[in-house]
Image (spheres, rainbow, N blue to C red):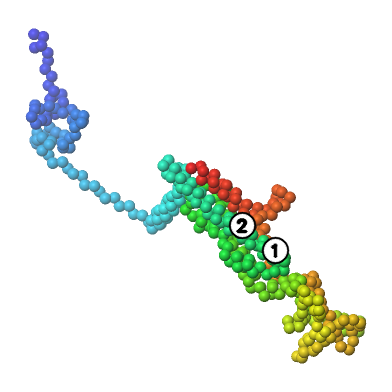
Amino acid sequence: MAEDKKPKIDLKARLGTRAVVAQGGPAVPPPVGIPKPTLPGMTRSHPPGPRVDASDPYSSISASDMPAARAEPQAITVEMSPEVVAAQKRGRTLMIVGIAAAAAVGGLLGFAFGDRSASLKSAKAAVEGAKELIVDVDKANTQVVQLADTLKATMENLRDNKYPEAQVKALGDITIPFDGGTMAGKGMGRFNSTTQAMLIQFASRAQEANDAKDKLQMLLSASKKELASVLEQQNEDTRKIQWSVFVVGGAAGPMAVMQPLERPQQFLVTKKGDTTYKWPEEIKIKDGGKEVALKRYTSGDPTGSTPKIIPVDPTTHSSVCANSTVGALSREVSRVETALRGEQGQGGADDKEGLIQLGDKLLEELRKIANSG
């Protein structure tokens, strides 16, 4: 038959290896250099055995019965110089600083890069903060207006030659309750730049107004006696003769000598309702360590062997000897009131915005933010 004539192929001779005895089956020669495949989803329970050497008398032992050699890991030691270690420490420090800076920036700008829920939460906090600041600014504005009105009344009293007793007391009860702490925790980081700038400016100018108010109250209180004395000279009912002159002869001609009158010797210019009132005929002055009585000049030659006293009109004092205290106080009161109310010029750059106007504009901006929620 044709099948009997086919030559037989000796696989062992061709491969030059002995068959591996497989457990539970016939001997099958393993392919050279190709590991035994595994089915998908299955893993080997043992590592593959060693290759079978035909010259080895024990090569017929199953690979699974051979103990697998365990490779021990080798420790690797790297020697680093002190400079490298120091450089690594500096690198870690810079990294920590960088992370902290990034975290700070992230905290400030988290609403722009965070998730939607965090952004909505931040926006809601800003709206609530704007509502709270509206109340704070409104309270502060009320005190600003009250301070401006009190300063206006102070100036009116000074012009009327009266000491502003009630106004000095009122200044101690007025304080503009707005500073940097008022803005804390109000979410102003979510406000637009215009509103932020206005808040900072309002807080700064409010504290400047408080400081100026305290200074004014201190000056008015400390100079009460002097100020009252000066002001009474401007009041017709309380105006007194405090200065006088007497005339003496000299080589070049007569000369007037100024002579202040002590309080006991001062006398009213006029006494309202008293038609019989007259100035004293004789006035006592001090000459060195003794008191000398001089006649008041009435007529004739003012010179002579004995000088005669001539009263000086008290309304002319300020034109010759300006009182620095009254002038300084008046200028300071006017300056602070202008800072609160503002100054209207010809329009444009000549106008100066007062703290009251700044507060009103700030309230408008805050209401926009509060209504946006």
Residue 145 marker: 2
Where does label 1 land, which residue?
156
What amino acid does circle 1 point to? Glu
The picture quadrant where one finds residue 142 is bottom right
Q: Is residue 26 above or below residue 151?
A: above
From the top left corner, tell me how far across and down residue 20 is, in percent: 11, 30
- In the image, farthest residue toward the bottom: 290
Q: Which badge, 1 or 2, is on the more N-terminal residue? A: 2
| Residue located 73% across and 73% down the image | 232
Q: Secondary structure at mark 1?
A: helix
The picture quadrant where one finds residue 254 is bottom right
Q: Is residue 373 above or below residue 291?
A: above
Alpha-carbon neighbours of circle 1 within 10 Å: few (<14), some, or many (≥20)?
A: few
From the top left corner, tell me how far across and down residue 373 is, in percent: 48, 42
Comparing 323 with 11, the one in front is 323
Quote the CA–CA distance across marks 1 and 2: 17 Å
From the top left corner, tell me how far across and down residue 276 is, in percent: 81, 79
| Residue located 14% across and 29% down the image | 17
From the top left corner, tell me how far across and down residue 357 is, in percent: 63, 52
Taking the image as shown, residue 245 lies to the left or right of residue 3, namely right
Q: Quadrant of the N terminus?
A: top left
Taking the image as shown, residue 366 lies to the left or right of residue 236, namely left
Alpha-carbon neighbours of circle 2 within 10 Å: few (<14), some, or many (≥20)?
A: some
Comparing 354 with 95, the one in front is 354
Whether residue 102 appears in this view of the structure is no
| Residue located 73% across and 50% down the image | 346
| Residue located 89% across and 89% down the image | 305
